[in-house]
Amino acid sequence: MAEIIIPTPLRKFTDNANRFTTSATNVGDAISELTAKYPGLKEHLYAGDGQLRSFIKIFVGEEDIKHLQDTKTRIDEKTVVSIVPAIAGGKSLPSLSAKERESKRYFEYQRNVL
Amino acid sequence: MNNGQFQNIQFSKEELERYSRHLIIPEFNIEGQRKLKAARVLVIGSGGLGSPALLYLAAAGVGNIGIVDFDKVDASNLQRQVLFSMEDVGRPKVEAAKERLLGLNPFINITTYDTHLNSHNALDIFKDWDIVADGTDNFPTRYLINDACVLLGKVNVYASIFRFDGQVTVFNYKYPNGEFGPNYRDLYPEPPPPDLVPSCAEGGVLGVLPGIIGSLQANEVIKIITGLGEPLVGRMYSLDALSFETRIFKYRKNPGNPLTGSNPSLKGLIDYEQFCGIPKKEEEVKRGSQGVKEVTARQLKEMMDRHEDFQLIDVREKYEYEIANLQGELIPMNRILDSIDKISRNKKVVVHCRSGSRSANVIKALEQKYGFENLYNLKGGILAWANEVDPSVPRY
């Protein structure tokens, strides 16, 4: 069974599971299985046009699937598939409401500290 | 890194004693120490990542260190920002940091910038430094630092954390042949939109994690200065501190990179808040005809579909709720002022009734009497929902 590693920021959509095992034989099928089990994950991985979001990378081993056969990249029981999002720090103002964002913009967005 | 200028660097007896554990490493020796003393490293952010990075860079003998930070030390920083002490609370971070670092190593120079880094000052601040170490906590500043480094040809040693996850890599590394390694925009072309993960609702960070990751960042800086080992160029180190699994991910130049790709479109710095989808003031939610902030039925549906974290309050009567409801929390209008503690102040709250009139009045009362700022009226109420979103909902 291949294994998909779920990063911390996305675990809220996987009932806190940090990995998912699959018998799929390519990356696309494996991710489809994952999003079928955790439907809330899908919109965070894919944009409306079905493309992988530009702040998410999927690696098979050390390699970006874009430089392999993309979603057709073959996987087997030894494969580790990693979903790797961009992360920016310990504090995430964007999750606040628009009003809160506005009132805290100067103190938070320009904040150059952790 | 220092173009041979380090050759003339001299050390006092005290310095030679201080750095003796470096000097006796055969690969490092006095030449490595000279390179450190000649180096100019700018650290952006003196917080969780900047604290360990700065301490180790200063201790190691990096001769010229710049610190950019506009913030003051807060008690909540001390959980992870080991550069500061209780007596520093309330002081400008750059001031407290400089004092601490010179106390640790008086043989180095510290330059401070007690300012917000922005598109207007970044190029001017960066131009005098060899290496930039990014220890910031937000996407706009990270893209700003990347772009400024690329425009000026500076190497950007990147470290980032989220809760239990850490990432380290080296962007825009300058090879001896003058070519540059890939940069942040090659790895992640665009930041996440503000309301989508991974900028997710719950932030937070395990205090020791920036200690680990910031130290690795300092290690990369020292490797680059001394030329020792293989810098993390085109490779990103990733740590999951909970499972203690580390991985290396490879990335390469992207022809579509707007700065360094085959058809570059960016020639200077931009508005990074706008780039990251952060609305400007004038784009903020306008108040509707009833004098309260509004969402339409379709917008509410989108919020639900996105699993956005918000509270939905239904201020109709119980009998109305039984006819049709949106599974909101039922707090009838005449009880709402006695139920203030049930209304969130930390997230968006959508209030609705049948047609949008009662809920608008409820919002006005809550805003005026209790200072709520996070309330939104469902425009047209559940009737609008029935008309625009779900025709199966009875119109009554």
Image (tube, rainbow, N blue to C red):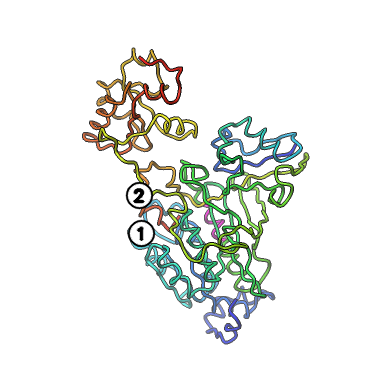
Q: Are marks 2 and 1 on the same chain?
A: no
Q: Position of residue B180 (x, y in %)?
A: 62, 68
Q: What is the number of callouts on the image?
A: 2
**Residue on which the image places disc 1:** B72
User: Spatial distance from mark 2 to mark 1, Cα to Cα?
Assistant: 16 Å
Pick the residue in front: A55 or B370: A55
The numbered mark 2 sits on a residue in which chain? A
Residue beneath the point at 37% across and 24% down: B384
**Residue on which the image places disc 2:** A104
Q: Amino acid at mark 2?
A: Lys
- Give the number of the mark in front: 2 or 1: 2
Pick the residue in front: A87 or A65: A65
Q: Which residues are magenta?
A: B208-215
Q: What label does residue A37 carry, if any?
A: none
Q: Position of residue B367 (x, y in %)?
A: 25, 35
Pick the residue in front: B266 or A54: B266
Pick the residue in front: B57 or B118: B118
- When the figure is inspected, residue A22 is found, relative to residue B277, above or below; the finding is above
Q: Amino acid at mark 1?
A: Lys
Mark 2, secondary structure of its residue: helix
Q: Mark 1, residues whose alpha carbon is within 10 Å: few (<14), some, or many (≥20)?
A: some
Residue beneath the point at 61% across and 68% down: B173
Q: Position of residue B248 (x, y in %)?
A: 67, 54
Q: Are the residues at dot 2 and dot 1 in contact (C-beta closer than 8 Å)?
A: no
- When the figure is inspected, residue B124 is found, relative to residue B52, above or below; the finding is below
Q: Quadrant of the C terminus of chain B?
A: top left
Mark 1, secondary structure of its residue: loop
Q: Position of residue B291 (x, y in %)?
A: 25, 35
